[in-house]
Image (cartoon, rainbow, N blue to C red):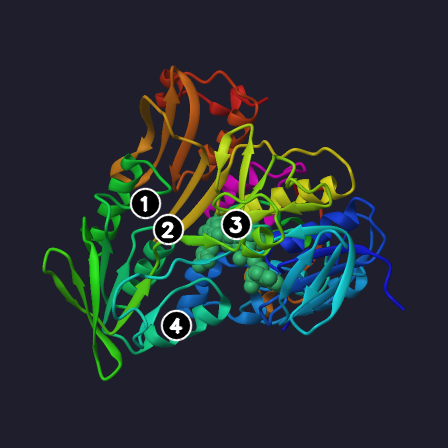
Amino acid sequence: MAKITFIEHSGERLVVNIPVGWTVMQGAVQNGVEGIEAECGGSCACATCHCYVDEAFVDALPAPSETEEAMLECTAAERLPNSRLSCQLKVSEALDGLVLRLPEAQS
Amino acid sequence: MAAAPGMVVIGAGQGGLQVAESLRAEGWDGPLTLIGEEPQAPYHRPPLSKAMLTGAMDEAQIAIRGHEFFGKHGIELLTGLRVASIDRAARRVALSDGRILPYRGVALATGARGRPLPVPGAELEGVLSLRTLADAQRLRAALEGAERVVVIGGGFIGLEVAAVARKMGREVTVLEAADRLLARSATPFLADVFAGLHRAHGVTVDLGAKVVELEGRDGRVAAVCTADGGRHPADVVVVGIGIIPNAELAAASGIACDGGVVVDDCGRTDDPAIVAVGDCTVRRGAYGVLRLESVQNAVEMGKSAAAALLGRERPFTAAPWFWSDQYDVKLQIVGLSAGHDQIVVRGEPAERRFSAFYFRDGALLAIDSLNRPQDHMLGRKLLDRKAPLTPEQAEDPAFPLASLTR
Ligand SMILES: Cc1cc2nc3c(=O)[nH]c(=O)nc-3n(C[C@H](O)[C@H](O)[C@H](O)COP(=O)(O)OP(=O)(O)OC[C@H]3O[C@@H](n4cnc5c(N)ncnc54)[C@H](O)[C@@H]3O)c2cc1C
Ligand code: FES
């Protein structure tokens, strides 16, 4: 399990325990985080699971794949250096304490 | 006391859930019931032929929304129940458990079912299809113990299953009755690329192979026989020969159907109180007559239909898009290529990293991208804005597509 904090665009904070091996997107959606749409169900095909990773964790995450990189170019909200697709972030113990902010819009 | 008439959504899949979600987002605060025949809350179907089959993902990970979502938004989710009939004169639906629900509006999101294989032996054990989570669990267990897998039908679902079975080390044959793969859903150009991809991974791809019989032994399937006298031994047979829209409920209540529930770009049927979305529909609108089976279609029609139920006009006119994952190839399609008279390729076909751009009279119709997600995403914008991309520009790797989307 890793404890991950989601900050909705409204400012609401949700702290969620997500099993290792799940994606951050799955943990968010199953636990009522609403700022993630995840239309394609995690296939890296929709870019509606966009999130901003807290600066302190950006370097701790594996770099985005080429596909994620390309899909990030097409997010509804502005792409920032700390933008990631949450369906491409696999949960490991190392992500314990991760903080993510959600954008204003996903589609 | 009878409940006040509310909105009733029939079918708790991708489209039905979207209608319910969008009704709340659009401000509907009356009763809202989402009724589904399957035992599960709405889940994503695409992983069923991908990560769910390999075991990389399990049931808990594919729910589209978590449990508390429904309570929080006042959506009454009834699972394991079917709607048996719609009485349009009295504005009531009858459920399989005898319950009667009055309605103000209805959304039909009943999806589709696999077309049954019309040959002797189709009922043998080991002959499987793939539409639901239960199907995926059966197929996964069957693939575990199989050596030889025959896939009947070279459509997207059949090809995705073939790719997974091959990755699991099974001997795989794909039998397609037409003279090419993906005959219903993609261009001959793309079909050739995918035939090559599967053959390169060791799959036997037989085109023009008309299945006439499944041979059994002790009630289990043993071989697939084709019209040309071919006999393909099999432990597991996967049937993926297209779908039949679940339009019977609508048809029985007198709503216009023609190979699906007939709707416009707003999801409206010929009854102003009833909309329909997703795989159960055939849409007559800006693109002519469309019968799409895709996540985007279910989601976007869902948004439009929810608005229509509240008397708002929100037509779905964006270019259709779709994806499929096979081996290490991500295919993404946007637009409708029918009627194209020119194909230009951008990228490296030899490495299966390219996009095919389809034009008619010099105007862009559609783009198929293999491992080129950026072309695809920019392509959605190019098509939706009718940007004046020329074939020469599409082909020129130095030409920035993004310059036309700003
Ligand atoms: C294996 C598989 C892989 C796929 N892969 C992709 C992909 O990679 N990309 C893509 O874009 N699309 C893909 N699709 C297609 C996509 O999943 C569908 O187009 C989408 O799910 C359609 O949504 P829907 O709501 O119209 O129907 P469904 O999701 O099928 O939902 C309909 C629901 O209604 C229920 N129902 C039917 N009749 C009644 C009744 N009378 N009362 C109550 N409930 C009823 C059904 O049981 C079902 O649960 C795939 C589909 C499958 C099966
Ligand atoms: S869920 Fe679609 S890209 Fe992440």
User: Which residue lies under the disc numbered 4?
Assistant: B140
Q: Which of B67 and A45 is in front in this view?
A: B67
Considering only order in the chain, which callout, 1 or 4, is on the residue closer to the N terminus?
A: 4
Q: Are marks 2 and 3 on the same chain?
A: yes
Considering only order in the chain, which callout, 1 or 2, is on the residue closer to the N terminus?
A: 2
Q: Nearer the viewer, residue B310 or B145?
A: B310
- Res B180 visible: yes
- The reply, left or right, for residue B152 in relation to residue B371 is left
> Please, what secondary structure does the residue beneath circle 1 have?
loop
Considering only order in the chain, which callout, 3 or 2, is on the residue closer to the N terminus?
A: 2
Q: Which amino acid type is shown beneath numbered disc 1?
A: Leu
User: Which residue lies under the disc numbered 1?
Assistant: B182
Q: Do the CB atoms of the residues marked 2 and 1 lie less than 8 Å apart?
A: yes
What is the chain identity of the residue bearing mark 2?
Answer: B
Q: Nearer the viewer, residue B390 or B236?
A: B236
User: Which residue lies under the disc numbered 2?
Assistant: B156
Q: In which quarter of the image is residue B141?
A: bottom left
Residue B197 x %, y %: 25, 48
Mark 2 vs mark 3, CA separation in Å: 15 Å
Q: Are marks 3 and 4 on the same chain?
A: yes
Dot 4: few (<14), some (14–19), or many (≥20) neighbours within 10 Å?
many
Q: Which amino acid type is shown beneath numbered disc 3?
A: Asp
Residue B210 x %, y %: 20, 54
Q: Do the CB atoms of the residues marked 2 and 3 lie less than 8 Å apart?
A: no
